[in-house]
Image: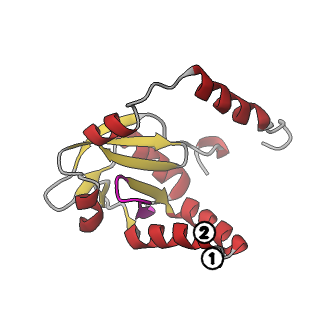
Amino acid sequence: MGINGIMQRFRGSYDVKIDDRGRIKIPAKFLQVFDSSFGRDIFITSLNGDHVMMYPMKVWEEIEKKFENVGVWNPDISDFVSRLSYWGTESEIDLKGRALIPPVLRKESQLDGVSRILGKANTLEIWNEDIFKTRELGDRFGKEKLHEVSKILNAITSLSSDEQ
């Protein structure tokens, strides 16, 4: 658990570079979250090879439990798990705060220049800066999409003070 029993979250984004050995230096703010809430064991993967998804192992194990409950006999789940397994590898963040991105994933996601690491609550994503701007920021986030997101978020009930 994090500070005062509160789970810390990954927030914001930072420019990062891949070193000559294929390692990424985790920004200090994100490293604090790993150290206070998750530990340094990680699962690195992707769905399509276009960007890297980095899960603290504790978070990844919860996702695996959901796969087990549904069963991999469902063709969509099987395809999903196969993709995650193809790109995936268990790893850890070293004492200097670096994580190795597997060569095949590094090459496919074009992490050879300036990259961007984004915090997404309990996971991280690493993108080639240009690819991210084109794919993820290329279209405006309009009122219709904002309305849909608002409906989803409003449907989620907040925890009462007794449940926190």
- Position of 114 relative to 139 (above/below): below
- Position of 42 relative to 152 (above/below): below
Crowd class of label 1 (few under 14; some 14 to 19; many from 20; radius 10 Å)? some
Q: Nearer the viewer, residue 69 or 122?
A: 69
| Marks 2,1: beta carbons within 8 A | yes
Q: Which residue is mark 1?
A: 72
**Residue 72 percent across, percent down from the top left:** 63, 76
Q: Which residue is mark 2?
A: 77
Compute the Cα span from label 2 to label 1. Answer: 6 Å
**Residue 158 percent across, percent down from the top left:** 78, 36
Q: Residue at x 38, y 65 (%)?
A: 92
**Residue 24 percent across, percent down from the top left:** 27, 53
**Residue 124 percent across, percent down from the top left:** 44, 48
Q: Nearer the viewer, residue 162 or 51?
A: 51
Helix, strand or loop at mark 2: helix
**Which span is picked out in magenta?**
41-51
